[in-house]
Image: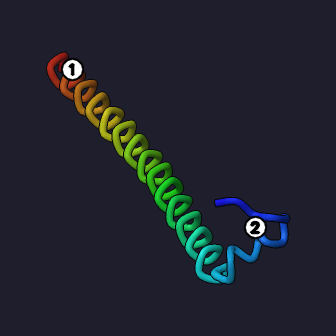
Amino acid sequence: MHFESFSDFLAMGGYAPYVWSAYGISTVALLWVLLSSLNRRKRLMADIHNKMAREQRIEEAKKLENTL
């Protein structure tokens, strides 16, 4: 689409509220997906770390129990 000026571009041929709100909603949705994915990954990695530490403590306790 060809626009005569920057203000025509912003007006989007009279459909500016629809077009710019669609861009805004899409941007917010994509940012939400990105941030929630990063947050979920962070929590998952923390859970894995905690489980590995727990398994290590259990293994150490078993070794200590076997030496007694």
Residue 28 location, quadrant = bottom right
Residue 57 location, quadrant = top left
**Residue most extreme to the left:** 66
Q: Which of marks 2 and 1 is nearer the N terminus?
A: 2
Badge 1: how crowded within 10 Å, few (<14), some, or many (20+)?
A: few
Q: Residue at x 62, y 71 (%)?
A: 24
Badge 2: how crowded within 10 Å, few (<14), some, or many (20+)?
A: some
Side of 67 where 16 appears, left or right: right
Q: Mark 1 points at which residue?
A: 63
Work out whether 66 lies above or below 10: above
Q: Which residue is drawn at 21% across and 20% down?
A: 63
**Circle 1: residue type:** Lys
Q: Name the residue under label 2.
A: 9
Q: Residue at x 60, y 74 (%)?
A: 19
Question: Residue 67: x, y in percent?
Answer: 19, 16
Q: Which colour scheme is used?
A: rainbow
Work out whether 22 lies above or below 65: below
Question: Residue 26: x, y in percent?
Answer: 53, 66
Q: Which residue is drawn at 43% across and 50% down?
A: 43
Question: Residue 60: x, y in percent?
Answer: 27, 24
Side of 65 where 34 appears, left or right: right
Work out whether 35 lies above or below 41: below
Side of 63 where 16 appears, left or right: right
- Give the quadrant of the N terminus: bottom right
Q: Distance between the residues labelled 2 and 1?
A: 72 Å
Q: Nearer the viewer, residue 10 or 56?
A: 10
